[in-house]
Structure formats: C-alpha cells, structure tokens
Amino acid sequence: MSDPTPPSAPAPSEGVLRTLRGRLHDEVGKVVVGQEEALDSLLVALAVGGHVLLEGVPGTAKTLLASTFSRALGLEFRRAQFTPDLLPSDLTGNLTLRDRELVFRPGPVFTNVLLADEINRTPPKTQAALLEAMQEGQVSIDGTAHPLPQPFLVIATQNPLEYEGTYPLPEAQLDRFLVKVLVGYPDEAQERAILGLGRRGLTPTATAEVQRVVDGTDVMAARAEVDSTAVTDEVAAYVTSLIRQTRSLPSVAVGASPRAAVHLLVAAKASARLWGRHFVIPDDVIRVAPVVLRHRLVLRPEAELDRLTADAAVANAVAAVAVPR
Ligand SMILES: Nc1ncnc2c1ncn2[C@@H]1O[C@H](COP(=O)(O)OP(=O)(O)O)[C@@H](O)[C@H]1O
Ligand SMILES: [Mg+2]
C-alpha cells in the first residue's frame, strides 16, 4: 500500500473508497506529516471491519494519527493505555451497585475507535479480553452479552524495541489483526515539515481545524463497495498458492492460516478500490501481502539468528509463486 503511483488509471467515476481516501489524506495531512501507508491501512481496516496493529518507536505520531483519523471520521475515539496493572474489567467494564441494583458500567472498549496503546505492556489476561471483544464484537459479563458499537475499530500500538516487562502477543492473537503496519521515522523533508507546522505550545494549531469528512453512511457504502469487488478464479487461486507457499518456506516454522488467506483477499479487494478499480489484480495482492502476512509467520530460530525478517519471508513467498497474467 506504500506504492505512490496507482498501478492503473482510476475508473471514470471515482468510487466511494477512493473518494474517502482523498478526503482523509487531505484532512489528516493538516496535522500528520507523511504516514500515508498507515492511513491507507486504517481506511482498509475500517472498510472491511478489520483491526490494525501499528508498530513503531515512541514519538512517530501513532497516537496523533489514530486520534486525527477518528476526528476526520466523526467517530467516538477512546484511548486505553495498556499498563502492567490494567485489568480486563478496566477495559470491558464491570457490574456496579446503583440504588441496590447491579448495573453494567461499560468500559473504554465501548467506542467506535479504540486506541489500545502499548498493548504488549499488559499481561495476557487483559490482552485476551481485548482480543475476545474484537473477535466477538461484544463483551459478556455474567452471562449477559453487551454488543459493541458499530463500526468498531481497534488500533493497537506496540514498541518494536524489546525491553523488560513486555508480554509479546501470542501468534494466535496476532492473527486477529487484519494488518500490521510498521511506522517508521519520517524522511528529512518530512522531519522539517513537522517542525514547520504551526503550534500552540506542543499541539499543532491545525488539530482544532480537522473536520469530519466521512460519516457512517460513507462507511457502509465503502463496505458494500469492497464486498462487490470482483475476484477472478485466477486471482483467488493466486492467493491460495501464496498462502500455501508461506507454509513451505525453509525459514518459516508456522506459515499463514486459512484466516490469513481470507484477510489477504479481502484486503486486496479494498486495495483495488483504493486505486479506483472494481476488480482485483495480482498487484493488489502483492501490495497488501506484507502488511497482511508479516505478523502471522513464525520464523525458525535459525532464521531469526540469520536476521531474516518476516518481511523477507513474505517477499520470498511472493517471488516463488508464478503471477497469473
Ligand atoms: N509525522 C508527524 N507529523 C506531525 N507531527 C509529528 C509526526 N511525528 C511526530 N510528530 C510530533 O510528535 C508528537 C508525538 O507523537 P505521538 O503521536 O504521541 O507519537 P507515538 O504515539 O508514536 O509515541 C506529535 O504529537 C507531533 O507533535
Ligand atoms: Mg503514543
């Protein structure tokens, strides 16, 4: 999704997702310099009901991007800091006594966009509570199911630097994230542009100017558009081969799951729409393969020692499978 030039010219009528992309980039771009790939991934996830994992060192605008994105969507946004002492009920909510009656007090997970900040600083029990809510679209307390609002998008962040006291998410849970985006440092021109932004104190002046440019109807229309994106048998077979290839790479201990295949194809459909096409081409699959697959491959210990990355493994899988033309 980082490819700056569309692989083919946009269709004459722009399409919902492509139009939303333009509006979001303009609006979020008032406050956030660069990070376009992350923004595209957020839009793709929103359009298919998936969730996003952002990985990057502190200070690279992960929080700023998530909050500005929700502002531009006019969606309710909440942030939960995943500290070591965060309890599952701090997230999901709990039963409290009010007028001698037990009532459910919803936790921060009851929102449209939840920023789960530094998700790997919280012990597994609380991580599992979040992942369960993501999976089920609801929270069950004492046998009563409380449905989460729609749309519901989790943007989780994690710091790639290994440090003491972190709890890496198990692969089974990572698989629930549609995409994992690596949020890197800005280039030099971007770094200067960040300093050039007008500020009141530490806050960019434009923060207050960010307008709502997308509404609930747009989101529903985007979802319908992705669903109606055409996939030929050849492209579906290509996705299957690619997924199966990840399971036979010498560097990989555990390859991508059937769920990963579903996520890959749906993300490719959304990506096709981002570029103004109503059908998926192999390039769409190749473009989204790194963000969709990198967190789902378990490398062999010797591959890790050789400093082989999951991205390199994904690239190897892509290189090994013939592209239908
Ligand atoms: N790409 C960027 N565009 C605009 N401001 C940025 C960018 N990267 C960093 N900043 C500045 O640094 C601050 C820290 O960003 P923040 O979102 O808190 O980072 P993170 O959540 O990744 O730790 C932002 O509020 C902003 O002032
Ligand atoms: Mg942050």
Image: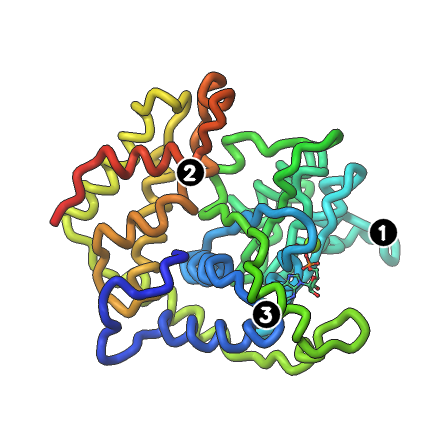
Q: Quadrant of ligand 1?
A: bottom right
> On screen, 20 above or below 101?
below
Mark found first going from the N terminus, 2 or 1: 1
Cβ atoms at labels 2 and 3 below 8 Å apart? no
Taking depth in this image into account, of 313 and 128 the one nearest to the observer is: 313
Residue 43 is situated, as x and y percent measured from the top left of the image, at: 46, 63
Q: Which mark is residue 75?
A: 3
Taking depth in this image into account, of 54 and 75 the one nearest to the observer is: 54
Residue 171 appears left or right of 259: right
For numbered disc 2, what is the local secondary structure? helix
Residue type at mark 1 is Leu
For numbered disc 3, what is the local secondary structure? loop
Mark found first going from the N terminus, 1 or 3: 3
Residue 13 appears left or right of 37: left
Instruction: Measure the C-alpha gap from mark 1 to mark 3.
Output: 30 Å
Residue 131 is situated, as x and y percent measured from the top left of the image, at: 58, 41
Most distant residue in the right direction: 99
Tell me the residue at 62%/56% (across/down): 62
Taking depth in this image into account, of 242 and 97 the one nearest to the observer is: 242
Residue type at mark 2 is Asp
Residue with the mark numbered 1: 97
Q: Which mark is residue 311?
A: 2
Instruction: Measure the C-alpha gap from mark 2 to mark 1.
Output: 50 Å
Residue 240 is situated, as x and y percent measured from the top left of the image, at: 24, 37
Q: Based on the displayed image, in which of its 4 quarters is residue 255 positioned? A: top left
Please identify, in this view, whether the residue under mark 2 or under mark 1 is nearer the observer. 2
Q: Is residue 124 visible?
A: no
